[in-house]
Image: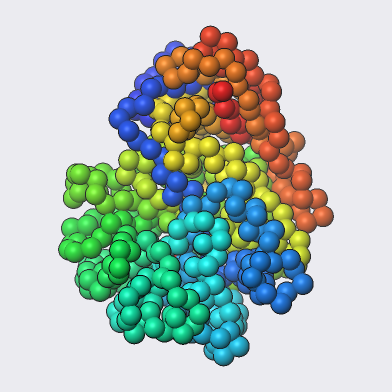
Amino acid sequence: MKRIFAAILLLATAVSAAAQDKSTVKVGAPEGDQVIPREIYGQFAEHLGSGIYGGIWVGPESPIPNINGYRTDVLEALKAIKVPLVRWPGGCFADDYHWRNGIGPREKRPSITNNNWGGTVEDNSFGTHEFLDFCELLGCEPYISGNVGSGSVEELADWIEYMTAASDTPMSRLRRQNGRDKPWKVKYIGIGNEAWGCGGNMRPEYYSDLLRRYATYCHDFDGNKLFIIASGASDYDYNWTDVILKNRKGKMDGISLHYYSVDNWGNKGSATDFTKDDWYWVLGKSTEVEEVIKNHIALMDKYDPRKRIALCLDEWGTWWNVEPGTNPGHLFQQSTMRDAMVASTTLDICHKYSDRLKMTNIAQMVNVLQAMVLTQGEKMLLTPTYYVYKMYTVHQGATFLPVEVSTATKEVRGGRGKATRTIPLLSATASRDGAGKVHISLSNLDADNAHEVTVDLEAVSKSSKAVGEILASKNITDHNEFGKPEVVKAVPFKDFRFKGGQLTVKMPAASIVTIELQ
Ligand code: AHR
């Protein structure tokens, strides 16, 4: 293990070694007016397994407590993490979805086979109205992923008119017949999903023409203003981003990027049964997203130096083998402290690039992949990842404060390509909210050692009082189960001293802390 300065904002300057389990963080004053967009905390809800049916939607007749068919427990849990935005209906499902099947009286809607995810038959009882009403209940922005792979330009144009036209048009009339007078407010429209894969297996040259064509007919109705997002690259595919940006013409407000923390798609590993080497390996893979984001941004800077186009990391997270005994097509996985650490360190990175990276959607919100909550019948539990989102709500919409981190690093090796990666063992982020309060979040990636972290806050706070919260557990494999739902949870944290602008925090191994300066 060697010591370096891992500069979380600007610098990566080598400095002299310090004791092994000591780290320092310097929080700087804001440079410019970089705000952490609330949309960095976006969610993704696909028709996949019990991501929608059973997870969000149980129908108004269900014995499971619900509000107009939406599970009350899930709704309340999501409200508590201030979900700013939800992307729907996919994912791969989006390019197979025909919205007209999901409107009108529920008993008359046709059933469909979900060809992407386990061949499950769905009754379409959760459609456009149910999704957009859900967003209204939750108080979040809807992000509609349009069907380019198997849908038509007309279908997408009509869908937008159906959702957003206030005046008397054929589609707003249809919506009114279906019981909704007022249009919904819909901002985000994705032009397809993974067009290079399940969204049509296209070449970037071909997709960029389709993007221009589909976007042309995405109209702004009656004051509703759309934000058009191009289907972007998968992780290291820089050519995709290059071609789409080079060929762009007309409407395009954002381009997406997908990054999952997986190297071996053949055997992704167990979510709960893993070693310390596995822990470090996935943190190496997940923190590599920084390099990927940087490289895509460099291309964007070339074509769009004024930063008018947003980068949207609209799918990311861990992806493990499904829980034993569950349908392999339903992507139901557990979430441990390891997933929580992937979440906190990824969010730290996303804050840093938020002058260009304006949205992220973790995959996925309920019961699928790195979920916030898991349900089983009437039971619901909160995952360790949920607690990270809860502790990080304070950073939503807050002014970004640059941090410099000096910590030990560790070389990690693993994955199919046996890649070697070097990871800093401490990650940090800081922000100042609208009320002037400074929050700092620290993640100790070290699975073996506690770290004493000294945070220099002199440049940003004159306060002398602080309160903290911590997410930690005895074992890195700890997780919450339906029989034991509170093994891992955030609790108040007091193991720090705060004096003269210096915060000294004693962080247990594999822990995540957020401290508020009051
Ligand atoms: O999130 C699961 C799937 O991963 C999505 O449907 C797809 O877009 C991606 O490949």
Q: What residue is rendered at 59% in x and 69% in y? A: 52
Res. 123 image quadrant: bottom right
Q: Position of residue 183 (x, y in %)?
A: 41, 70
Q: Position of residue 223 (x, y in %)?
A: 30, 63
Tell me how the rendering is colored: rainbow
Front residue of 68 and 454:
68
* Residue 277, visible in the rendered structure: no
Front residue of 336 and 275:
336
Answer above or below: position of 13 versus 474: above
Q: What residue is rendered at 60% in x and 54% in y? A: 78
Q: Residue furthest right?
A: 483
Front residue of 465 and 419:
465
Answer above or below: position of 254 versus 280: below
Q: Position of residue 433 (x, y in %)?
A: 47, 33
Q: Classify the position of the C terminus by image quarter.
A: top right
Res. 391 image quadrant: top right
* Residue 75, visible in the rendered structure: yes
Q: Residue furthest top?
A: 500
Q: How many numbered marks does the figure carry?
A: 0
Res. 246 image quadrant: bottom left
Q: Position of residue 466 (x, y in %)?
A: 60, 21
Q: What residue is rendered at 48% in x and 76% in y? A: 180
- Please indicate whether residue 400 sits to the left or right of residue 507 in the image: left
- Please indicate whether residue 275 sits to the left or right of residue 355 in the image: right
